[in-house]
Image (cartoon, rainbow, N blue to C red):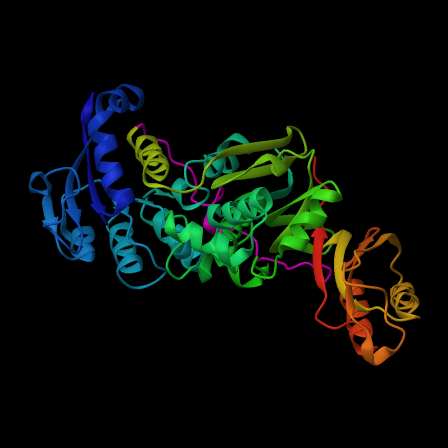
């Protein structure tokens, strides 16, 4: 067996500590499977005295992760610091410049600098592995980079944020509102004290940008993603979805079209019969459509110390056995410029919830606006409030919830029609619009 592979780990939080413990527990098994022993020799963190479940005195200690990357006697630098600039970026660049292999779980860093870092790694004959950066313990990066190399991929989509999936699952199961579910997620540790990055869709967008590059051979373009979060979702939307045969999920979707690649993150109604609809709680799921293999769906924990550490160690084992794959599936110089699809964003059915003044002619006005935009309505459902008959005078009108389901149309047409409807004075508030995705 070859000489042991020396690993330096920057960042000893939940994931970093789990990586050290996993390597210690399964070291012999990893050595047998990869043909080379793996040993942690150096670490870096802010607090040397913190109890992490193991003795840091067994490793060379570096207060500065950049110094670890620049000077430590290591073969692999594991970056678990986080953030798209500062110490994370500087230390990864320092390691790659030395020809040191890098393993990272940092989606933000890759979404912003991935193509540049890929080029740096390849120029210095170093690996840059990042399975843990997308969907935690799910091996989606390896699937796209290696297992599906013989397929022409038309679409990749999935539930990529456990916090949002947990909130939407709880809203449906317990009939409680968004704010209460979010507070519960924070109490259980599923959501950060400041959950904005998760609930507004940014986390999903970073992961989707990486998947898009792997799936379609394009440069990472996280700034070209249409993004909506889940903060506007109400229990009324959850209930309506259930009655219509759907479930609500926050999806990231990348799809090849005749004009380019769509990248979008938004709440979506998915058929209850689809595989993705069955993914509850903090689980993640990623689906890939290939021309030869058909649809492949991978499900598993998208976060957590042990699940993420599992992917980090898998990347280390690949390096130990000598596996070398282009960082983004093909050499960085061969990646195509990202071409954003023309503004249509989604072509399918839509769920629209309106708060309509209950007066004569209101429905006719709405139907006329939809017709003028070329939109056909599959159904119209009025859910009358249980507080009396319809008023007879306009100034006494009480808004009533109305749900529209459209046949297949474009997002441009829907938005234009809703703008006109708002201008007619027949609705009391901004309409809710949720896409209905065609899934198996």
Residues shaded magenta:
321-345
Horizontal and vertical percent for residue 19?
A: 26, 37
Horizontal and vertical percent for residue 436?
A: 72, 49
Image quarter (top left, top right, bottom left or bottom right) of the N terminus: top left
Residue 76 visible in the snapshot: no
Horizontal and vertical percent for residue 391?
A: 86, 71
**Residue depicted at x 9% and y 45%:** 60
Q: Is residue 75 magenta?
A: no
Above or below, 185 relative to 273? below
**Residue depicted at x 22% and y 47%:** 12
**Residue depicted at x 42% and y 44%:** 327
Q: Nearer the viewer, residue 383 or 65?
A: 383
Q: Is residue 34 left or right of residue 425?
A: left
Q: Is residue 274 left or right of residue 311?
A: right
Q: Quadrant of residue 380?
A: bottom right
Q: Is residue 342 magenta?
A: yes
Q: Quadrant of residue 126?
A: top left
Above or below, 264 relative to 400? above
Image quarter (top left, top right, bottom left or bottom right) of the C terminus: top right
Q: Is residue 122 left or right of residue 294?
A: left
Q: Is residue 64 left or right of residue 141?
A: left
């Amino acid at each position: 067996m070859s000489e042991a592979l020396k690993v330096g780990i920057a960042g000893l939080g939940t994931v970093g500590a789990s990586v050290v413990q996993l390597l210690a527990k399964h070291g012999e098994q990893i050595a047998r499977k990869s043909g080379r022993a793996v040993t942690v020799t150096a670490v870096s963190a802010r607090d040397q005295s913190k109890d992490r479940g193991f003795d840091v005195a067994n490793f060379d200690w570096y207060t500065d992760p950049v110094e670890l990357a620049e000077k430590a006697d290591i073969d692999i630098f594991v970056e678990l610091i986080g953030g798209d600039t500062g110490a994370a970026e500087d230390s990864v660049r320092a390691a790659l410049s030395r020809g040191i292999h890098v393993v990272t779980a940092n989606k933000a860093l890759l979404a912003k600098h991935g193509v540049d870092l890929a080029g740096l790694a390849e120029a210095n004959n170093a690996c840059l592995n990042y399975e843990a950066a997308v969907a935690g313990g799910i091996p989606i990066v390896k699937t796209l980079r290696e297992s599906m190399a013989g397929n022409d991929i038309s679409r990749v989509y999935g539930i990529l944020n456990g916090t949002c999936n947990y909130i939407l699952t709880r809203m449906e199961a317990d009939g409680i509102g968004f704010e209460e579910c979010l507070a519960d997620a924070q109490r259980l540790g599923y959501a950060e004290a400041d959950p904005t990055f998760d609930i507004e869709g940014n986390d999903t967008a970073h992961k989707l940008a990486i998947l898009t590059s792997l799936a379609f051979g394009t440069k990472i373009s996280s700034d070209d993603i249409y993004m909506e979060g889940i903060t506007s979702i109400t229990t009324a939307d959850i209930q309506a979805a259930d009655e219509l045969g759907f479930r609500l999920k926050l999806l990231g979707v990348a799809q090849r079209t005749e004009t380019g690649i769509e990248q979008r993150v938004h709440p979506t109604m998915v058929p209850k019969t689809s595989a993705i609809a069955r993914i509850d709680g903090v689980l993640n799921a990623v689906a890939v459509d290939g021309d030869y293999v058909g649809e492949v769906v991978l499900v598993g924990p998208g976060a957590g110390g042990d699940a993420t550490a599992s992917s980090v160690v898998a990347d280390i084992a690949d390096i130990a056995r000598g596996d070398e794959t282009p960082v983004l599936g093909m050499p960085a110089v061969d990646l195509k410029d990202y071409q954003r699809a023309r503004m249509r964003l989604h072509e399918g059915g839509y769920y629209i919830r309106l708060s309509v003044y209950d007066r004569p002619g209101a429905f006719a006005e709405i139907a006329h606006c939809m017709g003028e935009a070329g939109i056909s309505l599959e159904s119209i459902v009025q859910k009358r409030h249980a507080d009396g008959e319809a008023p007879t005078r306009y100034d006494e009108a009480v808004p009533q919830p109305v749900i529209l389901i459209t046949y297949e149309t474009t997002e441009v047409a829907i938005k234009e029609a809703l703008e006109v409807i708002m201008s007619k004075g027949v609705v009391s508030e901004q309409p809710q619009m949720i896409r209905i995705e065609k899934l198996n």
